[in-house]
Image (cartoon, coloured by chain):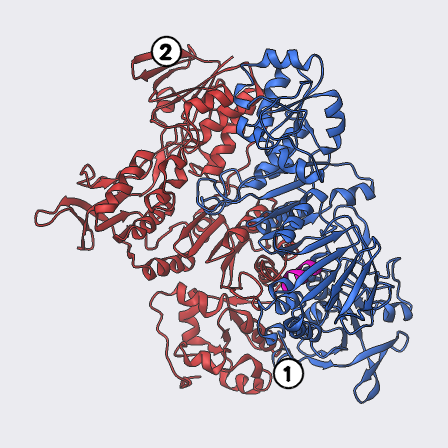
Chain colours: A red, B blue
Amino acid sequence: MRILVIGGVAGGMSAAARARRLDEHAEIIVFEKGKYVSFANCGLPYHVGGEIEQDSYLLLHTPDSLKAELDLDVRTEHEVISIDRDAQSVLVATPEGTETFEYDALVLSPGADAIVPPIEGMDLPEVTHLRTVDQARSLAVRAADARRAVVMGAGFIGLETAEALRHRGLEVTVVELAPQVLPPLAPEMSSLVEKELRAHGVDVRTGVAAVGVVKDPAHEGVTVNLDDGGAIGADIVVVSVGVRPSSALASEAGLEVDGRGAIVVDDQQRTTDPHIWAAGDAIAVRHGVTGQVGPVPLAGPANRQGRRAADSIMGRIDKAQPVLGTAIVRVFGETAAMTGASPRMLDMAGIDYFVVHTHPANHAGYYPGSQVLHLMGVFSPEGKLLGAQAVGPDGADKRIDVLATALRAGMDADDIAELELAYAPPFGSAKDPVNMLGFLAQNVVNGTTRTWSAKDLEWARDSALILDVRSEREYAMGHLPEALNLPHTHIREYIEGVKQIAAGRPVRVLCASGVRSYYAHRVLAQHGLDSATLDGGMFTLVESVPGLELVHGTAQPANA
Amino acid sequence: MRILVIGGVAGGMSAAARARRLDEHAEIIVFEKGKYVSFANCGLPYHVGGEIEQDSYLLLHTPDSLKAELDLDVRTEHEVISIDRDAQSVLVATPEGTETFEYDALVLSPGADAIVPPIEGMDLPEVTHLRTVDQARSLAVRAADARRAVVMGAGFIGLETAEALRHRGLEVTVVELAPQVLPPLAPEMSSLVEKELRAHGVDVRTGVAAVGVVKDPAHEGVTVNLDDGGAIGADIVVVSVGVRPSSALASEAGLEVDGRGAIVVDDQQRTTDPHIWAAGDAIAVRHGVTGQVGPVPLAGPANRQGRRAADSIMGRIDKAQPVLGTAIVRVFGETAAMTGASPRMLDMAGIDYFVVHTHPANHAGYYPGSQVLHLMGVFSPEGKLLGAQAVGPDGADKRIDVLATALRAGMDADDIAELELAYAPPFGSAKDPVNMLGFLAQNVVNGTTRTWSAKDLEWARDSALILDVRSEREYAMGHLPEALNLPHTHIREYIEGVKQIAAGRPVRVLCASGVRSYYAHRVLAQHGLDSATLDGGMFTLVESVPGLELVHGTAQPANA
């Protein structure tokens, strides 16, 4: 049996290695059009930033090591240029000319291509991408002499690149078309990351498009022109605006691809040709929450898809799980992570949900070094987990991994409240942040709590009594102009007063993070008031409403 | 409605707080026999060690703060001395005398008492426990003047205490009756922790019992006499040999307790009296894997049991989940964590299982600072997860939390292999250590791999060809005397030679961690040899066989 694999990085190399372990006697040839196989894609920005000093660390294997270890015939700088499905053969451009190879099984793992915006100047020498080892090497070298960089695109890799260049001492501007950095995150989570970027001197421009890159006649370098009239000088421009499936070879061979160009496969990674399998960034996968199908370019799924393709070739059944889109990025001192569906994805898919936010400490607050972790959960109206996001300096990865596991298991708020996680003061709390998220969602589902949020703010300002139950000191440091201050420890004492001031209006309670306002809400609700507690408290509100004006001092509002 | 709560720490305080949030109008009285309520039990060793400098950090709430925040009537130094179930009343010893209180609902959360070994000297002033804030304060003060400490008991709290006293500069000896520290861990995991203790200058004595503590007439302090004839001088002796349910009050009132003295409750936390609920260290819980019932003194479950008791009192159904025993301890630079059943527990319960060990990096090996994480999974013969343990300087907590979630969800090896966890180089690997554990178990279940382990060593030495497929350099640094060295990259080249030397014997392959020997095993098995790969490699073998003798140099064995 001869197995040909197209693409020698995550998906392709996983397929080849697994195939060899299952069948010592198969002939396995891997074609890689680039110079390197099995390199550490996700490590490229860290080489640019100098954290991974040796570029050799990025090269996990060589054709020689793969021959010795796995008896793989790995051919770099070999580009497959066509597939003849009837003949079961591929035509390959080699350094010595073209050559035809027949196959019994073919695995496509061609990856994805960087999207190049259709604007002028993309071919200037100052403009680069960060997709290959050579590009990383070159960028690392050029960064040493450059002063100013523009990163186009504030996705995961764009922000890693911005941080890397900042570590190298450059002035860095990030330009993002979307109104926020890290578009997959909810805006109020993303804004925490944006603050971290600004705190480290990165100039962040969101909601703006680059319309062209032109040589600067007066100075060295180029000018990046923006559609808001802005212009940014740069010595280096890194384009990181996304990728699209590299599926031309597949579609030209008549294999089915979807509307976004992703190769269609079944749950055994088989394409519409029974002798051809596919894995990695080029294929369409089903999202585990929304059910929507499309490309999801992530390393973890790519590896497992490759492994599964080999299993299927060898006649083993190993059914694909839908993809949850679990992803993480470190941005200076903060980490942002997510799994499952975001509110925006659910809006687009027409799926009902509610959201809860919490801001617990990463570990027991009484143990030194505890820091705030911002955690968001997305649940169905019945309490089923649909997605989660976390931002914080420590512990975000752990909580998202736990919630990704809970999501895969189909857990609901009750299950999450009951998760029995490892607790000692340096690691967590007896009620872990994940449990807290479960408690919050449970309380919403069964009506113990009722929340309000930024979208209700305008209405609340007009029509409700906004009760700020933080301490006088916290209130004085910044509060909504309409908010009446009554610390939560006095709520019972002044319950009749609250009723009088509310004068039939609903009461909308808030505090810093949502804990004390929940306590106050329970008191008010049980005294017959139309009450609700601000989900996530002022922490979440200020991130949700850019430019929210707060009043300082202790003066109470006139209309309260 | 009047609710009385006995015990003002984890379970009791959770019950009281939850009851108030659900019912603003109930009268809720909490009786605590000690001076403090709601204190940070798990933080006590860190105060002794000086990491939590202020003892006030351990006092999370006071009766005043609980009155203001939750309208709770909290009475410290109030000990309930009997329950009259017919009258629905309790008799309470107060600082002013005894007083009777009637109840509609009673919650018992009396906790557990430290076990005092039946040996002489337990009443000496040098001997203490570490269960209360006052004991922690006193120990912190005395540690400043002391030179030598003995900690009796090498459980979680014993080791935290040993570390704390070492931080204070004392000479510390730990005495443990069991043959290992941290008895709930598998021996080969526990021995990694023992090495860490020794590396930090702790004198560890396992498999030995203290038979008495006596005043030392010649010197200051005491002598701890051991049953192996040893004697250790000490200025401080901390007894931490376990706890037993504090259930005398319950059993005297005729409530059912189990053979180990734990209060029997239903899945709503209700005791055998319909007006009495119980939570925390005093109750019997069902283990989620073995089904065995008994006390499990852990803070997380205690909090949730208290919350559930309040729900039940208020007529809400919130069924208890069985307990998994998820636990964690930091020991100097290492962390040990576990969830579910250990091999020993399964042996005792008569449940079949197999074990896999792996030693991956905590995050991408090419990213700076990666460290080895030792991970063990326990699976049913069909591949269902039964338990997991981890030891390492970083990332053990995350992997055990993920596996505790997988265990709760009833996941098997296939599910764990497919978990989609957050990957970027600083946080994990595209194939996370948890996924690796799933792959390993999958391969065992479907026969792709076949493992051998320490228990087969004697047989293998006599009857098999032991093939060490590490590099020559690794082999020279220490190998089994019987092992023939053939680096895995040469296995195909010398396959006929291996067959000749094996001469009909089975081949037992090994490498450092089990990865390369798995590759070699696949080659040998597909060439018709009776082959198996050493689970966890030399890493696990040396921890499993204390005193294992290794040969240095490159000489090959004569019998190979």
Q: Which residues are magenta?
A: B157-164
| Magenta stretch, main secondary structure class | helix
* Residue A87 drawn at (x, y percent): 42, 10
- Work out whether residue A37 can be spotted: yes
Judge if badges 1 and 2 mark residues of a common chain. Answer: no
- In the image: residue A390, left or right of residue A158: right
Quarter of the image where one finds residue A552: bottom left
The answer for how far apart the CA atoms under marks 1 and 2 are is 84 Å
Tell me which residue sits at (62%, 15%) in the image.
B498
Q: Of B327 and A413, which appears nearest the observer? A: B327
Please name the residue that numbered disc 2 is placed on.
A100
- Which chain hosts label 2? A
Which label belongs to residue A216?
Answer: none
How many badges with numbers are in the image? Answer: 2
If the image is split into quadrants, where does the C terminus of chain A sit?
bottom left
Q: Of B219 and B192, which appears nearest the observer? A: B219
Tell me which residue sits at (75%, 20%) in the image.
B463
